[in-house]
Image (spheres, rainbow, N blue to C red):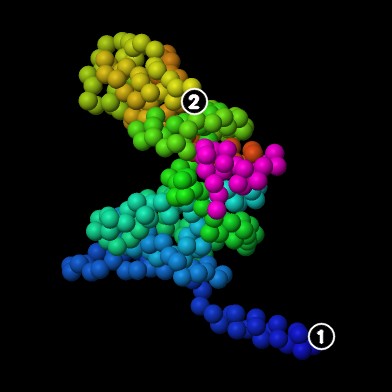
Amino acid sequence: MKPYVGICLLCYCLFLLLPLPTLPKSVNSSDEPSPAPDASHKIPTESNDAVFKVLDADAGVIYTFAERDFLIYTVASEMPASYPTEALKAQAVATYTYYTYEKARQAENTAALQGADFSAVPSTFPETYSPEGLKKYWGDNYDTHLQTIAAAVDAVYGKQILYDGSPIFAAYHSSNAGKTESSAIVWGNEFAYLQPVVSSGDTLSPHYNTTVVVSDSDFAAAFPELSLIGDAGNWISGTPTVTDSGTVTSITIGGTNYTGKQVREALGLRSACFSVTHGTDGFTFTVSGYGHGVGMSQHGAKAMAEQGFTYDEILRHYYTGVTIK
């Protein structure tokens, strides 16, 4: 027993001598332009040599991550560590597939990306993409949450969602109005695997219904291209067109047709699934879901995992006709 204790003490001492990882440094402007630095942030676990290079367009910095590390940081940023393991695994596979797809899609766009693979990442980037960043994000739960996320990623690392043998555009969102939406409705691009499916667990989401009240003046300011005058109760005319999934596809404001997506962006609503009324306080929007509603619902994945579904069953539910390999 004593030799074993001595070895443990020696290892502990050596560990104390190891440098701690630091957060990315901010990029300061200078009189002379300089090439964007290639920042690398790894978690203290093994990784293979494959990497994702991410452009922080605002800072002009390219961050290089081992694929596995990038997945851990992204899953940590996209889904609570308290979610069931199968939901976290589903998120990990969807994340890996999405960014593999993006890397291939952007392959001919290297000039604009300055040599990076892509730039569209969670809003917490780069703050949560380093060990120190996650420690600030999770606080005292860092060790437990990191172990949970890393275990989920490791369990499915390398697996992708395929359609006709190729990685899919694995879109995902927080929650919806009880049924996912077609990619054609939201973005105008039809994908056979991004079709509406029932997602009943979303009704349990804390984001299932939200209410937003917009004053008449703020509503008018949100649409500066219109001349909204007179009785505000008449600014919205007719009955909005809504899909089976609840997405508003057409609403007439001031005589001009808008999509629900345009209204959502103009007013900062959580989704394009909404109804609206007008009263003394202004316009009241009742909004269902959070996000674009296409592909995997994260809250729906949570509900399915709690019912005993596995990560691959979850993925095959939300992405029509796919295989997991």
- The image quadrant of residue 125 is bottom left
Q: Pointers 1 and 2 in contact (CB under 8 A)?
A: no
Q: Which residues are magenta?
A: 305-325
Q: Amino acid at mark 1?
A: Met
Residue position for label 1: 1
Residue with the mark numbered 2: 245
Q: Is residue 3 above or below residue 125?
A: below
> Residue 18's spot in the image, x, y percent?
54, 80
Q: Is residue 319 magenta?
A: yes
Q: Nearer the viewer, residue 219 or 237?
A: 237
In the picture, the disc for residue 120 is: none
Give the residue drawn at x 43%, y 65%: 51
Note whether 87 is above or below 59 in the view shown. Answer: above
Query: Is any part of residue 139 visible from this angle?
Result: no
Instruction: Pinpoint residue 151: horizontal percent, then vertical percent.
Output: 62, 60
Image depth: mark 1 or mark 2 in front = 2
Snapshot quadrant of residue 240: top left
Q: Is disc 2 placed on a helix, strand or loop? A: loop
In the depicted view, which residue is nearer to us: 123 or 151? 151
Residue at image location 65% in from the left, 81% down from the top: 12
Extreme residue in the right direction: 1
Pointer 1 or 2: first along the chain: 1
70 lies left or right of 315? left
Q: Residues within 10 Å of mark 1 (few under 14, many from 20)?
A: few
Residue drawn where x is 33% and y is 60% of the image = 116
**Residue at image location 73% in from the left, 87% down from the top:** 6
Q: Is residue 304 magenta?
A: no
Q: Where residue 299 appears, x then y in whole percent?
A: 58, 39
